[in-house]
Image (cartoon, helix red, strand yellow):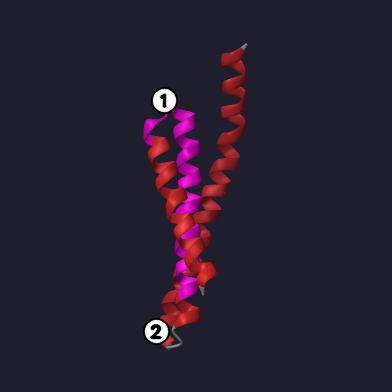
Amino acid sequence: MLVLVFLIGLSACFYVYYKVKGVRAKPSLAKEICSAKSSMALGSLVLFYGLNQMILFHSVLTLVIGGIFIVIGAGSAWAGYKAFRHYNPLHAKEAERDHA
């Protein structure tokens, strides 16, 4: 499916973008937020890739491996989301303190 290929490419672009942004970030909380976002992007890339493989090929082995990719990708995206939710308020407080 062309939509999944587009989402895989978009996820890869976001992953590279947030990895580079995280390396270039100065404060440690900004690095953690970029790391969490890149984890979400990589998780979605793996999830979409597994889903794409399950749709394209219908062998038992492909379905099992695609299912494993979906579970791992969803777990990585969920862990990245949890990390983002943890670090985002701390980063907002730090930014507010720096501007005051």
Name above or below for residue 19 compared with residue 75.
above
List x then y, in percent, for residue 3. Answer: 54, 68
Disc 2 residue type?
Leu
Disc 1 residue type?
Lys
Q: Which quadrant is home to the C terminus?
A: top right
* Magenta span includes 34: yes
List x then y, in percent, for residue 87. Answer: 55, 35
Is residue 100 rendered to the left or right of residue 75?
Answer: right
| Residue bearing mark 2 | 61
List x then y, in percent, for residue 10. Answer: 48, 56
Question: Residue drawn at (46%, 62%), measured in percent from left and top?
Answer: 8
* Numbered range of the magenta stretch: 23-52
* Magenta span includes 84: no
Question: Residue drawn at (41%, 36%), measured in percent from left and top?
Answer: 22
Name above or below for residue 32 compared with residue 59.
above
Is residue 88 rendered to the left or right of residue 13?
Answer: right
Is residue 68 rendered to the left or right of residue 87?
Answer: left
Is residue 47 rendered to the left or right of residue 95?
Answer: left
| Residue bearing mark 1 | 26
The first of marks 2 and 1 along the sequence is: 1
Which secondary structure, mark 2? helix
Question: Residue drawn at (42%, 29%), measured in percent from left and top?
Answer: 25
Q: Residues within 10 Å of mark 1 (few under 14, many from 20)?
A: few
Name above or below for residue 61 compared with residue 48.
below
> From mark 2 to mark 1, how far is it between C-alphas?
45 Å
Q: Nearer the viewer, residue 7 or 27?
A: 7
The residue mark sitting in front, 2 or 1, is 1
Mark number, residue 56 = none
